[in-house]
Image (cartoon, rainbow, N blue to C red):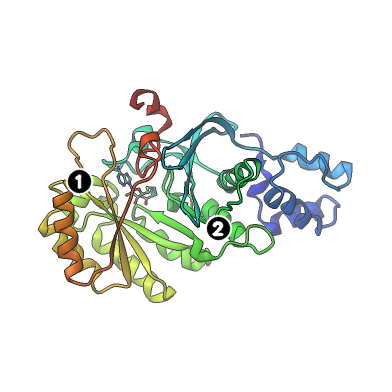
């Protein structure tokens, strides 16, 4: 692409760019407030010298995503499909509750991880997004609330849309820093969650970089054989390697880690699976978010029955392991976990 989005620059980079071009570096904060807080998509009305405006326009994009469709679920969840400047699909989901509004952002267009249960995998990977493209997804939800006279604000951001965040760590880190920045979004790190399919060596990098975020790991299954059959990444970093990375993260950060577990009939919702899960979670400062498999077009993978789910939960809870069942939101518009895949929407709906 010819230019990058101005929102992809850190404050320091923008200051540097301004001073390199003979402008006052303090303008960086003024421009950032305009973009991130005022949510503007042109420089019209911004009180900066005309030649600075021209300099910015010739060097950077100010708007990266074009809205293609917006779908609203019966439960209030909204999913937007955007196209990037180079025409690639990106989806964003907003999940409202009484008190919160979580935004699930995509970090890549498509995904390369090829998990058997996820529709995004069918798209393959187009490319990683810039941090400006990630941030624009959140800004757009803020603007949507504002334009629709809703009192709501985005309270939480989860990096759980299309893509593998730790395969695009630089941009994801930049986005988190900007979201955490008191001069822009001022979101506490507890409100930002990065979810990884298990890119073990990158987990320590989050701490080395000091990325302001919480960590969630898509455990999905609790033994290597099952996990490998569902997630090719387990061939590269198996459970031992992944859990070692989680353990050093736990030790160094002092935080809790969320393990995401998918309940799949006969595979991850059996008594043996429950015992394996207990063995993994019990000794660690982890809680489990379990989610019943969402419709994903793979005929070999089915959701368990209610009874199977309850029996599984009972076994796990009997050992005092923290396990919450997350209700899927937005299933009717294919906005739930593992359902984001623009290219397939026509066929699915
Ligand atoms: N690549 C990252 C983030 C995107 S997936 C990751 O793997 O964590 C976000 C979450 O949705 C993951 O926990 C994933 O395991 C889950 N998921 C994917 N497909 C699903 C499906 N069909 N049903 C339920 N959860 C699914």
Q: What residue is rendered at 63% in x and 58% in y?
A: 185
- Give x and y (percent) for residue 42: 75, 38
Q: What residue is pinned by disc 1?
A: 229
- Give x and y (percent) for residue 116: 26, 40
Tell me the quarter of the image containing the C terminus.
Answer: top left
**Foreground residue among 215 and 95:** 95
**Foreground residue among 316 and 107:** 316
Give the foreground label among 1 and 2: 2
For the residues bearing labels 1 and 2, Cβ distance under 8 angstroms: no
Q: What residue is rendered at 73% in x and 54% in y?
A: 33
- Classify 299 as above or below 7: above
What is the secondary structure assignment of the residue under circle 1? helix
Q: What residue is rendered at 15% in x and 49% in y?
A: 267
Q: How many marks?
A: 2
Most extreme residue toward the top is: 347
- Give x and y (percent) for residue 219: 28, 56
Q: What residue is rendered at 52% in x and 53% in y?
A: 172
What is the secondary structure assignment of the residue under circle 2? helix
Q: Which mark is residue 176?
A: 2
**Foreground residue among 241 and 346:** 346
Relative placement, left or right, of 231 versus 16 is: left
């Amino acid at each position: 692409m010819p230019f990058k989005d101005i929102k992809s620059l850190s404050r320091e980079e923008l200051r540097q760019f301004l001073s390199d071009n003979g402008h006052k570096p303090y303008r960086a904060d003024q421009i950032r407030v305009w973009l991130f807080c005022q949510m503007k998509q042109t420089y019209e009305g911004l009180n900066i010298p005309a030649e600075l405006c021209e300099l910015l326009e010739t060097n950077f994009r100010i708007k990266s995503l074009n809205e293609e469709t917006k779908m609203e679920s019966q439960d209030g969840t909204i999913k937007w499909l955007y196209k990037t400047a180079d025409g690639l699909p990106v989806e964003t989901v907003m999940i409202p509750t009484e008190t919160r509004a979580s935004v699930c952002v995509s970090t890549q267009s498509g995904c390369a991880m090829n998990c058997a249960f996820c529709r995004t995998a069918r798209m393959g990977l187009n490319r990683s997004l810039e941090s400006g493209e990630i941030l624009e997804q959140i800004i757009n939800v803020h603007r949507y609330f504002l334009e629709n006279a809703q009192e709501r604000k985005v309270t939480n951001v989860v990096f759980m849309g299309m893509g593998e965040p730790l395969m695009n760590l630089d941009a994801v880190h930049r986005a988190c820093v900007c979201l955490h920045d008191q001069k822009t979004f001022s979101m506490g790190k507890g409100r930002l969650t990065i979810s990884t399919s298990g890119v073990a060596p990158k987990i320590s990098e989050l701490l080395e970089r000091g990325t302001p975020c919480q960590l969630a790991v898509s455990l999905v299954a609790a033994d290597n054989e099952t996990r490998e059959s569902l997630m090719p990444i387990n061939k590269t970093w198996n459970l031992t390697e992944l859990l070692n990375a989680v353990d050093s993260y736990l030790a160094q950060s002092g935080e809790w880690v969320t393990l995401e577990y998918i309940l799949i009939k006969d595979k991850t919702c059996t008594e043996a699976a429950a015992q394996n899960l207990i063995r993994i979670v019990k000794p660690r400062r982890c809680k489990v978010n379990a989610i019943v498999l969402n419709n994903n077009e793979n005929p070999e993978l089915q959701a368990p029955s209610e009874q199977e789910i309850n029996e599984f939960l009972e076994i796990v809870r009997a050992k005092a392991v923290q396990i919450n069942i997350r209700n899927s939101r937005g299933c009717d518009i294919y906005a739930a976990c593992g359902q984001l895949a623009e290219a397939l929407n026509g066929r699915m709906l």
